[in-house]
């Protein structure tokens, strides 16, 4: 059986972050340059990325331009 890993990039205010228990205040920044992070995942063999726009999920302005730069 072949396993496929899907690296995730959660976007919040233009940065790649992780939230603790979905709490916005708990955001830990992993990258100030999400497109560079995506390129690093691809350079390390990722074929797919899971990208989440947390701003949109929280009902705020979507990060469409940033997502297009990642795609």
Image (tube, grey):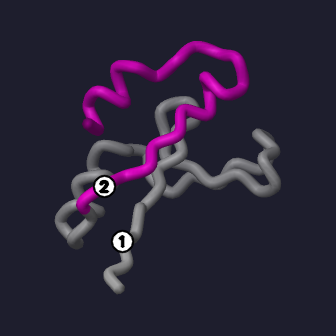
Query: Is 13 on the left-hand or right-hand side of 6?
Result: right
Residue beneath the point at 45% across and 43% down: 51
Residue beneath the point at 82% across and 54% down: 21
Residue at the far bottom in the pictured view: 1
Q: Residue 39, image x and y in percent?
A: 23, 54
Quarter of the image for the N terminus: give it: bottom left
Quarter of the image for the C terminus: give it: top left
Q: Earlier in the sequence, mark 2 or mark 1?
A: 1
Disc 2 crowd rating (10 Å Cα; few below 14, some 14-19, many 20+) is: some
In the image, residue 5 sits, relative to residue 18, either above or below, namely below
- Residue range highlighted in magenta: 47-71
Which of the pair 47/20 is nearer the observer?
47
- Asked where in the image residue 13 lies, by quadrant, the reply is top right
Q: How many numbered discs sit on the rendered protein?
A: 2
Q: Which residue is mark 2?
A: 48
Magenta residue check for 14: no
Query: Is 52 on the left-hand or right-hand side of 4?
Result: right
Q: Which residue is mark 1?
A: 4
- Please tell me whether mark 1 sits on a helix, a strand or a loop: loop
Residue 34 in view of the camera: yes
Magenta residue check for 48: yes
């Amino acid at each position: 059986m072949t396993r496929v890993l899907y690296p995730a990039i959660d976007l919040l205010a233009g940065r790649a972050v992780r939230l603790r228990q979905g709490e916005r205040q708990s955001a830990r920044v992993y990258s100030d340059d999400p497109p560079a992070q995506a390129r690093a995942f691809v350079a390390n063999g990722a074929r797919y990325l899971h990208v989440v726009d947390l701003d949109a999920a929280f009902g705020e302005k979507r990060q469409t331009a940033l997502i297009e730069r990642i795609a």
